[in-house]
Amino acid sequence: MNSLSFKLLIITLCAALAGMVCICSGPAPLAGGGGTETIIGKVVYSDGNAAPRTEVVLLPGNYNPVTGRPALDHPFIDTTNDSGIYRFAEVKYGGYSIQALHLDSLSRALHSGIAVAKDAVPVLLDTLRIPGTIMVFRPDSADTANGYLYIPGTDIAVPVGSGTGAIIIDSVPAGIILSVNYTVSSGSIQQVIRYDVPVPSGDTVIVANPAWKYSKRIYCNTFASGANVPGNVTGFPVLVRLTGSNFIFTEAKSDGSDLRFAKPDNTPLPYEIERWDPITELAEVWVRIDTIVGDDSTQYFTMFWGDSGAVDASNSAAVFDTGNGFQGVWHLKESSGSSAGEATGNGYTGSYNGALPRSEDGEISICQSLVDSGDFADMGNVLDAGSRNLSVSAWIRTGTAYVQFIAGKSNGDNPSATYGYLFTINLNNRPHIHLASGGAAWGDAGTFDVGANVEVTDTNWHYVCAVLDRSGNSNCRMYVDGVDRTDTTRGDITSVGNASNVLNFRIGAQSNGRYPFTGSIDEVVVGYTVRSADWVKLCYMNQKSSDALLKIDH
């Protein structure tokens, strides 16, 4: 059957025939108008040879195959001749679709949104391929006696029928179907079930959540051409960026509360909207994926929107689940007030000090700009490391060449029984983490520290992540921009005991206010877990402004 793949195209006539063929893409007006044109086309195989015995039908773009005949003066049906040619004469100006059916192979094609008008620009039609199937979850309010689904501009319609199962629409031309509609025989109900349905050749697409009019697939590319992550990563919060170029904000509610995400089997996925700004057409949404498959580009999840009755389901605690190791997550997105919101279910909301919040555009969304020595966020006496594993990460941007505190629970200086942990940029301008439960000098029993071998004070954004694995020094790593940059270590991580203290956890300054950070900080995350190299790299590749992981269907 694959050898019978064809390509339908409208052949532009020579200058002598100028004005006879007028087809252009774009939103199609209703059929009818002030003039007529002749459409002449040709159906060919993919190798360019003529495809005879192909039935070609021209229909109004809004045609309903159940309620009436085409609003045309005479039927527009033709069969291609031995040269693959068809012809429609006296076609009124207006919007149309063209269907093609190869009479021997039953391969099909559909091109919708065609406008016939004077002096229009000719366009190609889609490839004629083996048709696919659309499986539609039954609408809750479906009229089992009189309701039916149809594809506007085609002869395809199926009754809703009774029962609770899905409705099957078969023999659908492969490609993007502009909409699947629901109506009743009286025409009193007109409802779009879903816009822009991608129908695969020889396969089935599922239209779930019929109350949501729009959907898009979001693909995860972990091949070398994408995020370049070889291993599977579980329980991962994926960052989805929406802009005016990949999302039409006017199709959604003004606050994004109708947004939803689901796995291919329609299992809902938890998500958190960090920012939703329809004016600037910018949004950042975190979606927790059970498993991101390594070395793969076929994995996808689906985004839904367009239900005016939907209520907000954004749930940050379900995305940054404490059961998955998250203990503190601060987006640092606030532009007013004094509270630094925290995303996990722990509720470790902090308080801004100094001139904070001083918000600006960050690598992910909104971040905080720390300028004065009194600028920091204080979360209180939380996040004792104790004897646990520890992972701390942040996005930072600074040009200051001096010791700067990123985040932690310590007063710094020499180690002690109440030292805690401290994530900094050291005197060499490199990320560094210290942990201690005793000792008098670094390198003693009860102390451990490790740093990176690259500088990060070049005024560019950098993703820095420290991982402390209590099982041994070799498993303690320091990452910069997703790459393991671990330098030599001091002390023995297995000798460090309970690193608890009564100091406050802070972002941007030590617990005693010393060594303030100068620059910008975004997305500070603390976890009682060991994040893998694949996890850290995936964070960087997904969260950086030039996201290498996700591809959103257009």
Image (spheres, rainbow, N blue to C red):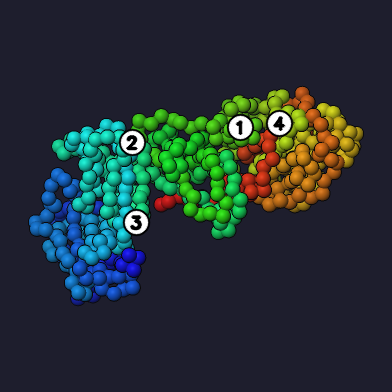
280 relative to 497, above or below:
below
- Closer to us: mark 4 or mark 1? 1
Q: Which mark is drawn over residue 19?
A: none
Q: CA distance from mark 2 to mark 3?
A: 27 Å
- Closer to us: mark 1 or mark 3? 3
- Report helix, strand or loop for mark 1: helix
Q: CA distance from mark 4 to mark 2?
A: 45 Å
Q: CA distance from mark 4 to mark 1?
A: 23 Å
The residue indicated by pointer 1 is 323
* Residue 269 percent location from the top left of the image: 48, 37
The residue indicated by pointer 4 is 506
Q: Name the N-terminal-most of marks 2 and 3.
A: 3
Question: Going 61% across and 35% down the picture, which residue do you hit?
Answer: 324
- Report helix, strand or loop for mark 2: loop
Q: CA distance from mark 1 to mark 3?
A: 41 Å
Q: Which mark is drawn over residue 202?
A: 3
Q: CA distance from mark 3 to mark 4?
A: 57 Å
* Residue 466 percent location from the top left of the image: 72, 42
Q: Name the N-terminal-most of marks 1 and 3.
A: 3
- Closer to us: mark 4 or mark 2? 2
